[in-house]
Image (tube, rainbow, N blue to C red):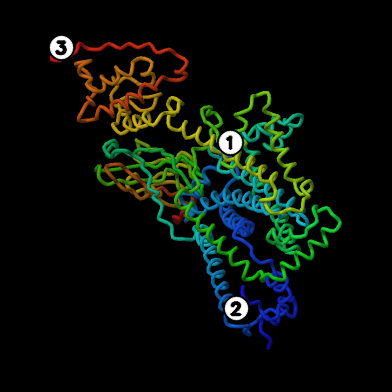
Amino acid sequence: MDESSPTPTTPPEEEAPDAGTIDRRGFLHKVSTVSAGITALAVGIPAAAAFVSPALPQKPLDDWIKVADDVALLDVGEPVRVNFVKTDQDAWIETRTLNSVWLFTEDGEKFKAYNAKCTHLGCSYVHDKEKKAFFCPCHRGQFDIKTGKVLDGPPPRGLDELQVEIRDSAVYVKYRDFRLGIAEQVVA
Amino acid sequence: MPTPFKWLDERVDLVGVRRALLDRKMPGGLTWWHTLGSATLTVFAVQVVTGIILAMYYSPSPDHAYDSIRYLQDQVVSGSVLRGIHHWGASAMVVLVVAHMIRVFVMGAYKYPREINWLLGVVLLFIVLGFGFTGYLLPWDQKAYWATQVGTNIAGTTPLIGGVLVKLLRGGSQLGAATLARFFALHVLLLPFMLFIVVLMHLAIVVRQGIAPRTKALEEDAPVHTSDAAYPAFYKKAYDRSKGAGVPFWPDITTKDVVVGAVIVLLLLQLARSFGAGLEPPADPTDSTYVPRPEWYFLPFFQLLKLVPGSMESAVAVGIPTVLVALMLLLPFFDRKSTRSFRKRPVARVALMVLGGSCVLLIGASMSEDSAAAVTPETGRPLTSVQRAGRALYAAQGCGSCHAIGGKGGGSKEDAPPLTEIGLKHSGAWIHSFLENPLRFHAQTKMPSFGPPTLSHQEIEEMTRYLVTLRGPNGDLRKPEFVDTFPEPPKTKEK
């Protein structure tokens, strides 16, 4: 510092002391501002990104669940009940639930999958081989195996059909639970 | 219509604040070393910002802590960078605090009238180390669990109160859920609060007293001791003189501070991006083979405990830190010579060299032991460079895909013998000639020949030197019983 500011007691507002001092102070101001900006951005950007991370577009979850390793293992014309473990992810907490679907195929090519809960009150229905229908032992509801439609009893709607996909001859379903006891199909 | 600045100034005296904080004159000639304190403050701010975000993705329970860190690393945008900055920032805090203390020590700035600020500085050092110790446990991985196991056990060796102390630290007799919750609360609630308060006091005193000028300004015609009656008056005069010739705090002094802060933060960002923070497998209390390591800045102490016999352990583990803390706290009260220049303080020079030197030596010893051990996990023995070269060849040639060492490797060919104790069964000469041409030994062997051109004789010898070190657990205590049978030499070589 070759020159001190003219009046030390009053801080220089806008009026100029002399050119050299101004240049130096202006330069120091700029260096400070840029450096402070770098500091703020270097930490601020990752911090802000992590903070807003949950609101950013997420890549869609692959929630297809493999329920059978090979289509050849399924009987044609005969429904089969498959139990599987479904893993639900709540941030870092994983919950595993045991779920079931009924799989049915008439030709070994096209597959139907039904949620294994009766649409009436959620009991597990069974395959009644004599009646050739699904039968719910709780309140005697009956469903058609081929279409899932209600044949008899109190169920308010047909069985909940699930999307099915065959990949490399393994059977995948998109498992969903629906609200029970009502006529419309609403995801629970 | 007044400008917003004028309007506010009329009410809260902004100009007055600016004059008091930013325009105040400081002694000139401050060095880059004088930026260490503000650099520490900058990194602390970084730790606060990154820590707040990390806490949003953390669950302080043994069931979920590790998974939540994994989630942060894998699922949160820039989560691993953020954790990396926080991790390296912790080391930077320790480095900067210690460097700042050394600067103050070397320049004699803890002397009159800054004794209180030195004391507050010592308190800050231990708060920062407390952050390091509590933060280390939070990821709940192997490193975290076992280092804290050892750390709390050291506290347990304290005479008389050891048992109580361990329970206090762990929140119970075992390291577990209560410990993690406790460390988390200390790390994010108590310690930040304490640090904030003490830093405020530390800074308020710096503003009030002004920064210490260059040592020369306070040495000319100074009374011999700072405790002399004439010293305060002398000090005031000398300080005002050097301040009068000084520069305003803003922007002349602060620019250096801000620049250094930016450089350090960029360095942290780079370290975070290149190395991250590391995460070992989840804590496994049943794994007795894990060798715990504390964070590097606790290594001098950790290594020291290896050097003392067991009967001395509690004296060293508790005694040495206690003595060091007492010395640091009392320093400004027993050192009352008014001499500030480091060149004229031989005792201070020797003390710093001994303390600094022994810390460096202990860290070095600990790290070299670790890296030597890391080379031979299968035998626990350090290897020479030739043996290491042989080990690299062993890996490069894929020997491990057929042969197992200490249960690792092998499998694809079931009749390949494990080599865990090969050094006890065969001499180097036998191994060398076998590697060269196994068919000479067993006509049916599936072992490929490694003689030239596959490997040179030099390389075969390197691999041999490595293989003879394989003696199994405690192999150094066992006598080799060689079962070398050499085949009949080929006829052409007969005389």
Residue B303's tag is: none
Disc 1 and disc 2 on one polypeptide chain:
no
Q: Is mark 1 on a helix, strand or loop?
A: helix
**Closer to us: B241 or B62:** B241
Q: Separation of disc 3 and disc 1 at Cα? A: 63 Å
Give me the chain letter of mark 1.
B
- Three-letter code for the amino acid on which mark 3 is drawn: Glu
- Image point 28% across, 29% down: which residue? B459
Upstream in sequence: badge 3 or badge 1: 1
For disc 2, the marked residue is A21
Q: Separation of disc 2 and disc 3 at Cα? A: 96 Å
For disc 3, the marked residue is B494
Residue at far right of view: B229
- Three-letter code for the amino acid on which mark 1 is drawn: Ala
Q: Is mark 2 on a helix, strand or loop?
A: helix
User: Badges 3 and 1: C-beta atoms under 8 Å apart?
Assistant: no
Q: Residue B349: x and y, percent?
A: 66, 45
Q: Residue B21: x and y, percent?
A: 70, 69
**Closer to us: B322 or B429:** B429
In the rendered image of this protein, does residue B6 appear above or below residue A90?
A: below
- Three-letter code for the amino acid on which mark 2 is drawn: Thr
* Quarter location, residue B415: top left
Give me the chain letter of mark 2.
A
For disc 1, the marked residue is B147
Task: Determine if residue A188 is in view.
Answer: no
